[in-house]
Image: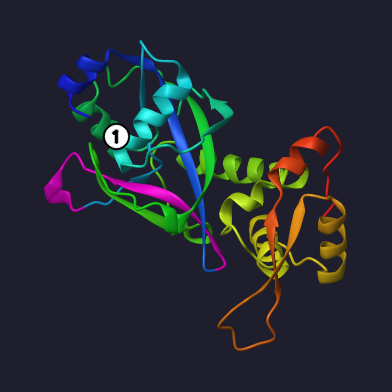
């Protein structure tokens, strides 16, 4: 974002938002990253970060997070959940990051506290496209996240741990699956996010006993193995039992 755009938005130089967008694709958990425009194009240095920027003084934090995500990646109408605030006074350690701030910020040396959000999306439903100061927007496997700008590696790791904790108490994994899915596909989501192998029989017993899966009179199509039954997430029934403990103990 240029200085002119910052002034138009009346950006607060001390508060920012950062967005950690998780997606699931072909059995792999990924995170949305941007490649920033570098301060010195002749340097050919690539610097990656999470989508984030300063907040607008006229907006609440949630609105700012959604605006920033759209401005940098063109992703819109995504539910974002606030999970942590990062306020280390030494958040800018890399000289390249400091140089970049000198190019794009009105007060580049101002201390910035960032409020972080995360979300889960079906990768097939969204096509990120770089805009503003993002040169590129892309999905990166969580196991291959590179060295990121500022303290974004810490933000990413905290988001991933928050997601793991969330998965144990709420069925958020359904956000990453198609409307109709198999129990095997659901188990794969849990195993991928939690980073562990789950006992098939135990997983199915626990998940079915929760009462928010609706078995369908349909089976997989076009698979080389025995066709598995399809299920749907019963959101209405889930809301009825939401007050109960959903701890899965995986």
The span shown in magenta is 27-44
Q: In this view, does 58 lie above or below 131?
A: above
Q: Which residue matches tag 1?
A: 71
Task: Choose between 193 and 189: the one closer to the eye.
Answer: 189
- For the view shown, which residue lies furthest in the front direction? 217
Q: In this view, does 161 lie above or below 56?
A: below
The residue tagged with tag 1: helix, strand or loop?
A: helix
Place of residue 218 in the rendered image (x, y in percent of width and height, measured from the top left): 67, 71
- For the view shown, which residue lies furthest in the left direction? 42
* Residue 211 visible in the picture: yes
Instruction: Count neighbours of disc 1 (C-alpha within 10 A) and say few if under 14, some if 14 to 19, many if 20 or more.
Output: many
Place of residue 224 in the rendered image (x, y in percent of width and height, measured from the top left): 60, 89
Task: Choose between 132 and 237: the one closer to the eye.
Answer: 237
The quarter of the displayed image where residue 2 is located: top left
Q: Residue at x 35, y 31 (%)?
A: 68
Q: Residue at x 46, y 20 (%)?
A: 61
Place of residue 71 in the rendered image (x, y in percent of width and height, measured from the top left): 29, 34
Relative placement, left or right, of 188 versus 3 is right
The quarter of the displayed image where residue 238 is located: top right
Q: Is residue 36 magenta?
A: yes
Q: Is residue 123 above or below residue 116?
A: below
Q: In this view, does 205 lie above or below 14?
A: below
What is the quadrant of the N terminus in the image?
top left
Task: Choose between 7 and 226: the one closer to the eye.
Answer: 226
Task: Choose between 208 and 170: the one closer to the eye.
Answer: 208
Relative placement, left or right, of 185 versus 60 is right
Relative placement, left or right, of 214 versus 221 is right
Q: Does the magenta stretch include residue 223?
A: no
Q: Residue at x 52, y 68 (%)?
A: 26
């Amino acid at each position: 974002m240029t200085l002119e755009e910052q002034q138009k938005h009346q950006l607060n130089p001390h508060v920012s938002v950062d967005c950690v967008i998780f997606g699931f694709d072909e059995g792999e958990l990924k995170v949305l990253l941007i490649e920033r425009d570098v301060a010195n194009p002749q340097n050919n240095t690539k610097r990656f970060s999470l989508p984030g920027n300063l907040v607008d003084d006229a907006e609440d934090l949630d609105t700012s997070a959604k605006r920033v995500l759209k401005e940098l990646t063109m992703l819109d109408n995504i539910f974002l959940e606030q999970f942590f605030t990062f306020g280390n006074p030494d958040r800018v350690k890399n000289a390249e990051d400091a140089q970049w701030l000198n190019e794009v910020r009105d007060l580049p040396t101002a201390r910035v506290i960032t409020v972080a959000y995360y979300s889960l999306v079906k990768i097939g439903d969204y096509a990120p496209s770089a805009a503003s100061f993002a040169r590129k927007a892309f999905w990166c496997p969580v196991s291959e996240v590179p060295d990121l700008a500022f303290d974004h590696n810490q933000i990413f790791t905290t988001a991933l741990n928050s997601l793991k904790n969330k998965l144990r108490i709420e069925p958020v994994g359904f956000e990453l699956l198609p409307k109709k899915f198999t129990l095997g596909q659901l188990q794969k989501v849990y195993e991928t996010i939690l980073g562990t192998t789950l006992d098939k029989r135990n997983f199915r017993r626990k998940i079915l006993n929760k009462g928010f899966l609706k078995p369908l009179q349909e089976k997989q199509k076009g698979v080389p193995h025995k066709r598995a039954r399809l299920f749907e997430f019963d959101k209405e029934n889930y809301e009825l039992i939401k007050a109960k403990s959903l701890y899965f103990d995986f």
